[in-house]
Amino acid sequence: MKNRTLTLRRLLACTLPLLGGGAALAQAPTPQTPTLRQNSVPTWIAVPNQEQARDIAETVYNTWRQSMISSNLAAWQSATAQSRQVKVRNMIVSQKREFPRSLFAQEATPPALVSLRYVGALTGANGYTLACTYIGKADLGIGGKPANTALVLLFVHENGKWKYDQLRFFNLSHLPQVAERLRKKDIAVLKEQDGFHPYEKLPATPPPCPAPQYIAKVFVDAPGRVVDMTINGISHHNFEDVRLAEIVSGGLRRGNNTISYTIRDIAKPAEGAKTPPLAIGLFIMPETEGNNPGRCFEYIVGDGDPTVSGNYTFTVSDDTIRAMNPKNSKGVQPAPFRPVPLKQKPEEGK
């Protein structure tokens, strides 16, 4: 009898390009963008005075951008939202890098607005959050020829001042209708497409995380779903209709670790259609060149199968760490914790 092969292995087989490997893991992650999706217009969104919003966005963003170019920590702290400061600090520390020295060790320069066209702005949280959208061929510092892009700058108002939080970007090459409406400065499209929205609430400031014993990343492939996750009570993640890997704040430790997550569908599938597969993987990242990521936790759901939220405790053992070295890869490998066993498909010809 031939060995049966596990289904959906393809979902995690392609994680290595996202996760990185060997010494490369310490580099900053490549920016990722969420899916641009049309929703009904939320009641909490408002349209501000456009000239005032643009002036705020460009003054604050350019101040933040210059602080990054000049490696000016005091200016960066003054221009950056408090919650983002802690999130950036946690990401750097969780990769066993030094903060703040590693903050300015990025080769890419933040994109300039001078060559982009202002589209419009929206506010949320009773006027305490702001999203400003620009279009053009933005150089995002991720390689390749700049494409026609929508750039969304996000800001929050705290302690009497506007602060920069982060940016989103969307490639418009395959969205000609959206691109045309943006070119015409159609504010309605900003309301309709959730990627252009400001924050509904002011972002919470996470606690500073400790230095990790093991650097870790979590990978989620969640088409059509939202996954809210917490790892070891410290690292909080939100994945919305994306395939993405993120650094685990505080990393993982030898012995017991915890993961909890809730999963919900963004929209019901069309009649007769199956829900797409879903995958969650939690990995220890190698710090030695040539070693492989160590898979600690794995949750995989097949086409049409229901998803289950949960809270789980899993163990990082000596065997988990030892198996990361290819020289020790012979023999039986330690299986990751799986709350649901992987399905098996029938043998060929059966």
Image (cartoon, rainbow, N blue to C red):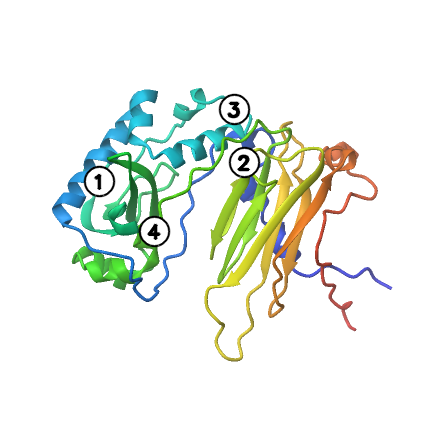
Mark toward the viewer: 4 or 2 = 2
Q: Residue under label 3, please give it.
A: 97
The numbered mark at residue 57 is: 1
Q: Residue under label 4, please give it.
A: 170
**Kind of residue at badge 3:** Arg
> Which percent across, then down, holds residue 110?
31, 34
Mark toward the viewer: 3 or 4 = 3
Label 1 and label 2: CA atoms lie apart by 29 Å
Label 4 and label 1: CA atoms lie apart by 19 Å
Label 4 and label 2: CA atoms lie apart by 26 Å
Q: Residues within 10 Å of mark 3 (few under 14, many from 20)?
A: some
- Identify the residue shown where x is 60% and y is 29%: 212
* Location of residue 163 by image quarter: top left
Q: Secondary structure at mark 2?
A: loop
Label 2 and label 3: CA atoms lie apart by 13 Å
Q: Residue under label 2, please give it.
A: 249
